[in-house]
Image (spheres, grey):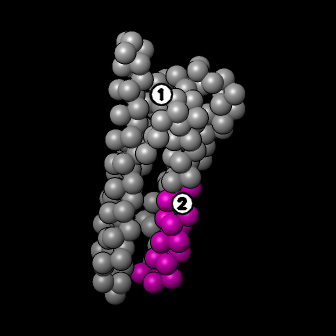
Amino acid sequence: MTNNSEEFIAYLTHLRAEHRRLREFLREIEQTWTKQDITRPSELESQVIRKLEGVRAELAHHFTEEESGGCLDEAVARQPSLGHEADRLEREHPALLKQLGQLIAQLKAASQAIQSLDDAKEGFRRFSEQLEAHEFAENRILEESFGIEAE
């Protein structure tokens, strides 16, 4: 195994761990929404807002790491035909962060109305689906380039 291969394995391991941690954060938020007493929306909003702000910080850090080189860059170097997809995914980063920021702002501005919480929950579901699709596409690039399952 060359140093290049060892470096790739380290990047891949780190990327897998980051994706797993982000999925765990999202599941935790979903569970918070599911388990909470909906008759106390202000408490729910407060808990979910704190968790979403944590996800946003983690996601911003994750995207910064991806944009500074590593696993996806190595995949594209090995298979340049994947470059357009990798570029597309990188261009999604600001939109995903913006969407999450808007969801946080929506919750902060929400009244005590149950409908506001339902709307925010739907926004969270859409964000989760988009982030999952984004990570799936990143993994697909790695699988095509390196011929391994990225998780």
In this picture, residue 108 sits left or right of residue 54: right
Secondary structure type for disc 2:
helix
**Magenta includes 16?**
no
Q: Position of residue 26 (x, y in %)?
A: 39, 59
Left or right of residue 118: residue 9 = left
Quadrant showing the C terminus = top left
Q: Which mark is residue 59?
A: none
Quadrant of the rendered image containing residue 59: top left
Q: Secondary structure at mark 1?
A: helix
Measured from the top left, where is residue 115 in percent x and y? 51, 82
Q: Is label 1 or label 2 in front?
A: 1
In the rendered structure, which amino acid carries the disc numbered 2? Glu
Mark 2 crowdedness (10 Å alpha carbons): few <14, some 14-19, many ≥20:
few
Q: Is residue 8 above or below residue 39?
A: above
Q: Which residue is mark 2?
A: 129
Chain part drawn in magenta: 112-130
Q: Main secondary structure of the magenta part?
A: helix
Q: Residue 29, position in %: x, y?
A: 36, 64
Q: Mark 1 or mark 2: which comes first in sequence? A: 1
Residue 71: mark: 1
* Distance between mark 1 and mark 2 Cα atoms: 23 Å
Name the residue located 63 percent from the left edge and 24 percent from the top edge: 79
